[in-house]
Amino acid sequence: MTRRKTPLPGWLLIPAAIAAIIFLLPLIGLLTAVPWRDLASLVADQATIDALMLSLECSITAALLCVVLGLPLATWLAYGNDSLRTIVRVLVTLPMVLPPIVGGLALLLAFGKQGVVGSSLDGWFGIEVPFTWGGVVLATSYVAMPFFVLTVEAGLRAFDPRYAEAAATLGANPWRSFRTITLPMVAPALRAGLLVAWARALGEFGATITFAGSFQGRTRTMPLAIHHALESQPDAAIALSLILLLVSAVVLFLLRRQWFPTSTRSRR
């Protein structure tokens, strides 16, 4: 049976329409400024290709790191509410609220040659993290990880533990129960967290330029290339912005079932 919707006050339409227009106008401005005739040549430019490939490589690597490191962390956070977990959750959330440039500076002070960890990496192993491909991955992972962890933790907290308990009574050990029961049932949260983390890593700018710099072919991702092109090639900056806009639209389309429910039907 279709659930009857409660009528909304008519006056809400006015501020709702204004808000929709505010979000729509920048997109219209971007699309009207795209140099369509030169778009193919701008996208085919070597600097654009380098930035695109680097962004895809680093964002995908960062997303995979979010899964490898973030899934155990999200699981641990979801199975308890003690003070230690609260402190860790606050630390995980910090990159979401800090200005990205502050996050990049913090990474530089931690992993730079004179940093808390970076001095040891450089002195003992000769490893330099800042201003390298690895630095881009680290910066993007740092800002993207909280989105994955919090999304997956929410999914795990909504999971009914009775399913895992039933599996345990049938002889399944904790790892098998987690792998065959819990993970498949929270798969929508995993997909949503992975896509959001990847999109955040793809669009990261502040922490990356502070920690990894902007060197073509090495650390200049698409957001950094847009910033660089604005000074000398505005048309190229617009073309790159269009690419990021299309990628973001695709991500939202893939997440539509998690974020935009299309039905309010209920069963009797």
Image: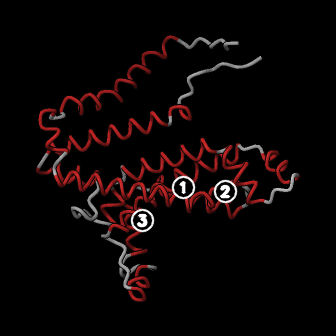
Tag 2: amino acid: Thr
In space, the residues marked 1 and 3 are separated at their CA atoms by 16 Å
Counting residues from the N terminus, which is met first, the one under dot 2 or under dot 1? 2
Tag 1: amino acid: Thr
Question: How many labels were placed on the picture?
Answer: 3
Q: Is residue 223 left or right of residue 125?
A: left
Q: Which residue is mark 2?
A: 75
Q: Which residue is mark 1?
A: 93
Circle 1 crowding by C-alpha within 10 Å: few under 14, some 14–19, many from 20: some
In space, the residues marked 2 and 1 are separated at their CA atoms by 15 Å
Q: Quadrant of residue 57?
A: bottom left
Q: Is residue 236 above or below residue 22?
A: below
Considering every residue shown, the one lying at the far bottom of the view is 124
Indicate the secondary structure of the residue bearing disc 2. helix
List x then y, in percent, for residue 230: 17, 48
Tag 3: amino acid: Leu
Indicate the secondary structure of the residue bearing disc 3. helix
Identify the disc placed on residue 138: 3
